[in-house]
Amino acid sequence: MKRIFLTLCLCAALLASCSPVDLNAPMPTFDTGIDPNAWAQIPAGEFHFGQHEDIESTEAYEIMITDVTAAQYADFLNTALVDGYVKVDGDKIVGFYPGDVFHGVKHEEKIEAGDWLFIPLNDPSQRIKFDGETFTVQTGYENHPMTTVTWFGAWGYCEYNDSRLPTEIEWEKAGRGEDERPFPWGEEILRENANYYSSRDPFEDMSSFGSRTSPVGFYNGQMYDGYQTVNSASPYGLYDMAGNVWQWTGDVYEGMHYRFMRGGSKDTYDMDLRLWVRNNATPTYFSPGVGFRCAR
Amino acid sequence: MQFIKDRFNYLFNSTKGLILVAIAMVGIITAVWGMLSGPMAEMGVREVVIKLLGMDIVQSEREGRIIILYHSIAMALIAIETYMVTGLLKMKAFFKTAINAIITVGYILTMIFGMGFAYFGHNWAFHGVYIFGLSLIFFAGVLLCIALYPWNKEYYVTDNEYAHTKSGFDLERAAFFATAVTTVLSALFGAVPGSFFGNGFEAFLAENVIRLPEKTTMEYSVIGHLHIMLALIGIMITLIIGRWLNFKGILHKVAMPLMILGTIVLNLGVWGVVTPLEPIAHMVIYVGATPSMFAALLLLIWDWDKLIKDGTAHIQKPNLGHKLSALVRDPLKFGPTWQMLFMNFTTSGIGIFMAIKLDEVFRVWPAREERIELTGHWHVLSAIIATIILLYFGDMNGFKGKLRQWYGWSIIILSDIAFGAVTVFEMKRLFVTEAEQQPLVNGLMYAIDFGLGMLLVILAILLVYRLTDLFKNKGRWTEELDHELAQEVNQ
C-alpha cells in the first residue's frame, strides 16, 4: 500500500512537471511614467570597467534610458516593411546584414552578407503580432522590452533609427558611472531593485509560468498596487541596466561569431545582474529574456 | 583529561577517526555554505546566514570566494582518500604517521583559514595560513609518492591473483603511485597560475571564459588543473574501492596496466594544453581517458560477478531473479560500482554528447546555458565521488542488517534522484523552451533539493550518532582505534 502511495505521489509530481504553461496568462499593466524615447548623455572620460576595475575610456555618446519597447519595435517594423528595409519570409521577419570578416578560428562560424532573421513570428513567446499588413503588440506588453529578437533584429532597429548597439564598454559605463559599484544603483541588491529570478515581482508566478518581463523603467521608486519599488536608475539615469532582459551589445570580435549580452535578466540569479557579467550567443539566437537598447 | 586525550587520540591518530573528522568538516561546510545559493537564496535563507555568521560578502569577490570554497572542500576530500590509501596499502609506519599528520594539519588549516579569509573579511594572515595549509598538503603528497614507491622490493607480490610483472612488481601499487605522482604534479599546474592571478586577485571561473577563442596560458592552466584534479580524485577512489573489494583475477591483471597507462596519458594531455601541442591535447586526453574508464568498467564487471556468485553460491541453478537479488543484496558493496556506472549517464555520457553536438546545439544557446551544463556536469561528478566515499564509510562503521540496507539504499537512491534531475535540468533546452520550462524546472528542483537535502540529513544523523558514541566509554570508537582498513579488505 505504501509503495502504491509513493508511486502515485511520484507520478503526480511528474505530471505536474509536464503541465502546459499559459504564455498568455493575464498580465498586470502599469504606467511607469518613464519615457522610452528619452536618451541619456554620457560624458567622455575614464571609468572603472569590468570586475577587476580596469580603467577604460569612451568618447561622449547618448544611450536610450530604457530598453527598446515592444511598441517601439512594432512601429519600426511597420515603417521598415513599407521602406523595404525588412521582409516577411514565411514565419520570419528578415533584414539585410552586410556580414562579418571570417577568420577561420576554431568554433567560429561564417556570418555572410545577406538576409538574416530579425524576429520569428511563430514563436509562442513572441509579443509582436502580424496580420499580413500591420504589426501590433499583444495587449499589455506595449511598454515591456522588445524580446524574442535576434542580434540582427536589434542591430537593424538601431541602424534604421540612425543609431547603433552600444559597445560593451559603452554599455557598462552607462550602467556604472564613474565609481566601482557592482549594480547600477549601488553596492547591494534587494528584490525591489530589479526583475530577476524569483524576485517576487508582480509579473512572476514561479508555480506556473515563472518569470516575465516588467515594463521598462518599472523600478523607479513608485508603488504599483501595493508593490513598492526602489529607484534603481544608474548614475546617468538609465533603467533596467540590471535584470528584466539581457541586452545585446554591438561588438563584433575577431575570431568569434558570438555576440555579447549584458545586464542579466528575469531568468537569472542576482549574481548575473552585476554590471561586468557577460553572456553571449549566436547572433540568430532569440529568447523571451533578451532585448536591447541603442546608443548614438 | 584522559577522557579528552583518548578521544583526541582516536580522532587524530586512527584512520577511521581521521576519516570521520574530515567527513564531518565537509558536512559542516556543505550544510552552511549550501544555504548561500540556489533555493536557499531564493527563500531568503542566505541573508539570514550571512547576518547570523557575520559574513563579509563583497559582490566583486564572488569568484574568488568560490575558488577558496572549492579548494577547502577538495582538500578534505584529498585527505580522506589519502587516509584510505595509507590505511589500505603497505607502507612504513613512519610514512603513514607523517603523511596523515601533515595532511590533517594541512587541510584543517586550509579550510578554517581559507574560509575565514574568503567569507569573514580579508585578514591577510589568514590567507598566508591558507596557502601554508595547501603547501602542507602538497608536501604530504610528495611523501605519499615516496611511501608508495613501487620499485621497493619489499612491496613486490607473488600472488598470481594480482597484476604484477614476472619479477613481482606490483602493478596495482604502481597505479596508486602513478595517480599520486600525477596528482602532485597537477597540483603545481594550479599553484603556478594561482600565484599569477593571486597577485592582484583577478580570480575567474573557468566556465565563464569557455567560449573565448583567445585564452592565456595561465587560463588554460587553470582549466586544465580543475579538470585533471577531479579526474585524478575519481581515478584514486576507483583504485581505493578496488583495493577494499579486493579486486583480483584476470580482470585485475588487465585493468591495472590500463589504469597506469590511462592516468599518465590523461595527464600528458592536460599538461599539453599549455604547450604548442594544445591543438591535439584534447585528442590525447580522450586517448588517456578511455583506458582509465575501461579499467573502471572491468572493476565493475568483476565486482558484480563476485556479488552474484557469492550471493547464489547456495543455489544450484540460479535464475535471473536469484542473480539480481544477489547483486543488490548488499548496497554498500554494490553501490560504489553502481555509482560509477551511473556516472556515465550523468557525467561521461553527457560530456561526450556535448562534445559531439557542441557547435550544432550547445553553442547556439547562450553561454549562461552552457555554463549550467558545465557546472552541473562536474558538481555531479564530485558528488558521485562523495557518495562512493560515504558508502565505503558506511561499511567502515560496521553497519549490518536493516541499518546497512537503509543507509546504503538511501544514499544510492537519494543521490541518483538528485543527480538524474540535475542531468535533465542541464539538458532541458533540448526538449522545453525557455518560456515553457517553469513547471519542469520546479519538478526538477524539488527532486534535486529532496535528494541532496535528505542525503545531508542522513549524514547529519550519522555524525550525531558518531558524536554521541564518543561519549561512551566502550563505544564503537574504541573498536576502531586500532583497526586498520587493510584488515577489512574483502577476502
Image (spheres, coloured by chain):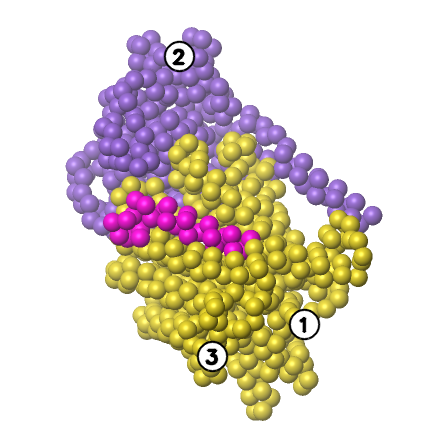
Chain colours: A purple, B yellow
Residue position for label 3 = B154
Chain on which label 1 sits: B
Q: Amino acid at mark 3?
A: Glu
Towards the viewer: B413 or A73: B413
Give the left or right position of residue A283, taking residue A141 as reference: left
Quadrant in which residue B177 is drawn: bottom left
Q: Amino acid at mark 1?
A: Gly
Let me know if marks 3 and 1 both belong to one chain: yes
Q: Residue visible at 33% across and 48% down?
A: B281
Residue position for label 1 = B398
Let me know if marks 2 and 1 both belong to one chain: no
Residue A285 location (% of width, % of height): 40, 29
Q: Residue visible at 36% across and 61% down?
A: B186
Frontmost of labels 3 and 1 is 3
Instruction: Give the CA separation, mark 3 to mark 1.
Output: 31 Å
Give the left or right position of residue B245, taking residue A191 as reference: right
Q: Is residue A141 above or below residue B21?
A: above
Let me know if marks 2 and 3 both belong to one chain: no
Q: Residues within 10 Å of mark 2 (few under 14, many from 20)?
A: some
Towards the viewer: B485 or A80: B485
Query: Magenta residues?
Result: B272-297
Frontmost of labels 2 and 3 is 3
